[in-house]
Image (spheres, rainbow, N blue to C red):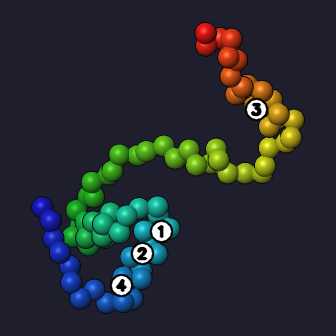
Amino acid sequence: MTYTLENIPDDLERALQERAAAEHKSVDAVLLDAVARGLGVEAHQPVKRRDLSFMTEGPPLEPEVLEILEEQRRIDPELWK
């Protein structure tokens, strides 16, 4: 079922967006959680997904490591004949 909310006060909208960002959720998910808590209903738990972003963050790789990775990525034309 779909509902449309209108005339949401600015402070409430700001709080929703901040909570959604802090919890890495959509505003819809935060709203559903809040409504469920307010009504004393157990909220449906969304499927947890793996977040692998930590693998792309961090300090830069050492030049030696980058060189080894580049060597592994080279294509040998002889193997593709």
Which residue in the structure is indicated by mark 1? 21
For marks 3 and 1 on the same chain, the one whose residue lies earlier in the sequence: 1
Separation of residues labelled 2 and 4 (CA atoms): 9 Å
- The numbered disc on residue 70 is 3
Q: Do the residues labelled 1 and 2 touch (CB within 8 Å)?
A: yes
Which residue in the structure is indicated by mark 4? 12
Residue type beneath disc 4 = Leu
Residue at x-position 41% and y-position 46%: 48
Q: Are marks 3 and 4 in contact (CB under 8 Å)?
A: no
Q: Which of 18 and 59 is in front in this view?
A: 59
Residue at x-position 35% and y-position 69%: 27
- The numbered disc on residue 17 is 2
Separation of residues labelled 1 and 4 (CA atoms): 14 Å
For marks 2 and 3 on the same chain, the one whose residue lies earlier in the sequence: 2
Which mark is nearer the camera, 3 or 1? 3
Residue at x-position 17% and y-position 75%: 4
Mark count: 4
